[in-house]
Image (cartoon, helix red, strand yellow):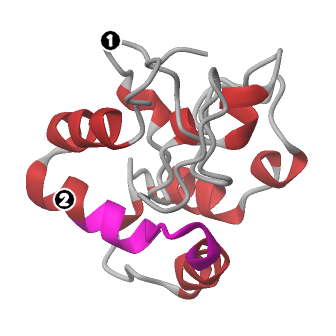
Amino acid sequence: MKMYEVLDEIMFSPCGMNCMVCYRHCFSKRACDGCLKGDRYKPNHCRICKIKDCVKEKEYSYCYECGDFPCKLIKNLERSYKKYKVSLIENNLNVREKGIEVFILEQREKYKCSECGGIISVHDRICSECKKDYDEIL
């Protein structure tokens, strides 16, 4: 899958994950549509996400809007993302500070393969198209 010229902000999940660079989105023949769209082709752990339910219940768009941010739920998820060299809390703070449009542009540049324009998966740091390994860079 090639990196889109324009990224849809719906691909930024409330927890701070950029769904565009998720392994499931990059490498699946049936790409997930992102956290905030329906459950079609979505991994089970995303379907039953307590963070997504919490944000909906409180009528927020992103976790950073909540007075309890960062809460226990986001901190637990944050720990699991350290191995991917991603901070969901930092992503939320960047969106709060810069706005979603700037964050999306920065993410597009960060995760676009310099060789072929594919999408670099945040989970394994491999390009979706040419399979170049970006482990050392990211």
Report the label total. Answer: 2
Is 109 positioned to the left or the right of 135 in the image?
left
Whether residue 5 appears in magenta in the rendering, the answer is no
Q: Mark 2: few, some, or many residues within 10 Å (few <14, many ≥20)?
A: some
Q: Which residue is mark 1?
A: 5
What amino acid is at disc 2?
Arg
Query: The N terminus is located in which quarter?
Result: top right
Seen in the picture, residue 79 relative to 64 is either above or below; the reply is below
* Residue plotted at (52% across, 14% down): 2
Is 94 positioned to the left or the right of 113 in the image?
left
Residue 94 shows in this picture: yes
Quarter assignment of residue 28: top right
Q: Position of residue 121 (x, y in %)?
A: 60, 42
Q: Earlier in the sequence, mark 2 or mark 1?
A: 1
Quarter assignment of residue 19: top right
* Element marked by disc 2: helix
Seen in the picture, residue 110 relative to 70 is either above or below; the reply is above
Is 26 positioned to the left or the right of 30 in the image?
left
Q: Position of residue 87 (x, y in %)?
A: 44, 71
- In the picture, the disc for residue 120 is none
Whether residue 87 appears in magenta in the rendering, the answer is yes
Q: Residue furthest right?
A: 44
How far is the residue under mark 2 from the one under mark 1?
23 Å
Q: Which residues are magenta?
A: 82-93
Q: Nearer the viewer, residue 45 or 71?
A: 45
Q: Position of residue 127 (x, y in %)?
A: 59, 33
* Residue plotted at (61% across, 84% down): 79
Q: Which residue is mark 2?
A: 96
What amino acid is at disc 1?
Glu
* Residue plotted at (41% across, 14% down): 4
Quarter assignment of residue 104: top left
